[in-house]
Amino acid sequence: NLMVPDENAAVIWRGPMISGTIKQFWTDVLWGNLDVLLVDLPPGTSDAALTVMQTIPVNGVVLVSTPQQLAGMVVRKADSMLKQLKIPVLGVVENMSYYPCPDTGKDHLIFGPSHAQELAKAVNTHLYVQLPIDPSIAELGDAGNIEVARQPGLKKILEAI
């Protein structure tokens, strides 16, 4: 939204514009002395993902999936790209794995059964964590307070990184 005059306007860019902007973020932003820079990318093997992998010194990637088999297929394609680029996969995270019902305490598999273990095995890594659906995350994001969100399962990933 910082790049368009109206928050409802679409940013309609082809690959070269996306790639150029990613390169500019890497070279022109004063990042300071960082221990880690996390880059959240769209799913798959898009121009954005390829540009990040070829431009920024990437030490490793955490692949994120959801329980649907289609999501697993997209993650396997991303893993294939990473192998070709010789970038290590640090592990797999399954997001939206289940919904913990506040009334009963029972976990509901809204998007079907997990395939995270077999996905991690297929890409020759391990499963870090299976994260629940947490409506409070969306509420905090909508309120502009996402930095106060707490997701205990993420601690495993951050410690590993």
Image (cartoon, rainbow, N blue to C red):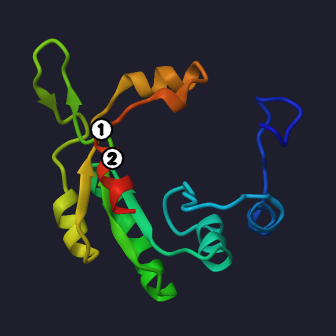
Amino acid tagged 1: Pro
- Locate the N terminus and report the quarter of the image it occupies: top right
Q: Which element type, helix, strand or loop, lies under badge 1?
A: loop
Viewer-proximal residue among 33 and 91: 33
Q: Residue furthest right?
A: 5
Q: Residue at x 22, y 57 (%)?
A: 116
Residue receiving disc 1: 152
**Quadrant location of residue 108?**
top left
Residue 70 visible in the snapshot? no
Q: Is residue 110 above or below residue 14?
A: above
Disc 1 and disc 2: Cα gap in Å?
6 Å
Q: Residue at x 58, y 60 (%)?
A: 37
Amino acid tagged 2: Lys
In the visual, does 75 lie left or right of 32?
Answer: left
> Are circles 1 and 2 on residues that touch, CB within 8 Å?
yes
Q: Is residue 85 above or below residue 10?
A: below
From the top left corner, tell me how far across and down residue 4 is, in percent. Answer: 85, 38
From the top left corner, tell me how far across and down residue 150 is, in percent. Answer: 38, 31
Residue 21 visible in the snapshot? yes
Residue receiving disc 2: 155
Viewer-proximal residue among 14 and 142: 142
In the visual, does 129 lie left or right of 28?
Answer: left
Q: Residue furthest front?
A: 33
